Amino acid sequence: MDVNISYYLIIVGICIVALAGTLMIARTVSKKEPQSQEEDLKSLKEAENNSSIPMLTIIYLITFLIIILLVWIYIF
């Protein structure tokens, strides 16, 4: 297998894993939709503690670092 193709396959695989993680987080967030105004207010107060932004940041930071490492290996 050509080295170029293997790098592309690794990068595509990493991006697919990151996409799957994002979709899993989106599903858990969308399942928590409140039905009443009281539940909506309560969920807004809890959103600060249960935010998915830190998890998504970690997923994409790791993805970005691995892709940068693979590009650096490919160039040198």
Image (cartoon, grey):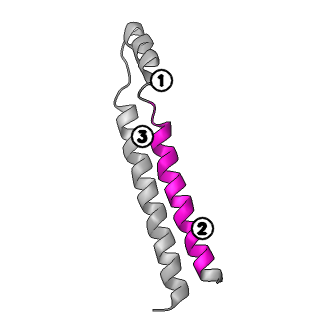
Q: Looking at the image, which residue is at 37% across and 19% down?
A: 34
Q: Tell whether 46 sits left or right of 2.
A: left
Classify 10 Å Cα crowding around label 3: few (below 14), some (14-19), many (20 and above).
few
The disc labelled 2 sits on which kind of residue? Answer: Ile
Classify 10 Å Cα crowding around label 1: few (below 14), some (14-19), many (20 and above).
few
Q: Earlier in the sequence, mark 2 or mark 1?
A: 1
Which residue is tagged 3? 26
Which residue is tagged 2? 68
In x, y percent, where is residue 30? 39, 32
Which residue is tagged 1? 48
Instruction: Tell which tag, 3 or 2, sits nearer the viewer.
Output: 2
Q: Quadrant of residue 32?
A: top left
In x, y percent, where is residue 58? 48, 48
Q: Main secondary structure of the magenta part?
A: helix
Q: Earlier in the sequence, mark 3 or mark 1?
A: 3
Image position of 3 with respect to 60: above or below: below
In whole angstroms, how far apart are the C-alphas of marks 3 and 1? 16 Å
The disc labelled 3 sits on which kind of residue? Answer: Ala
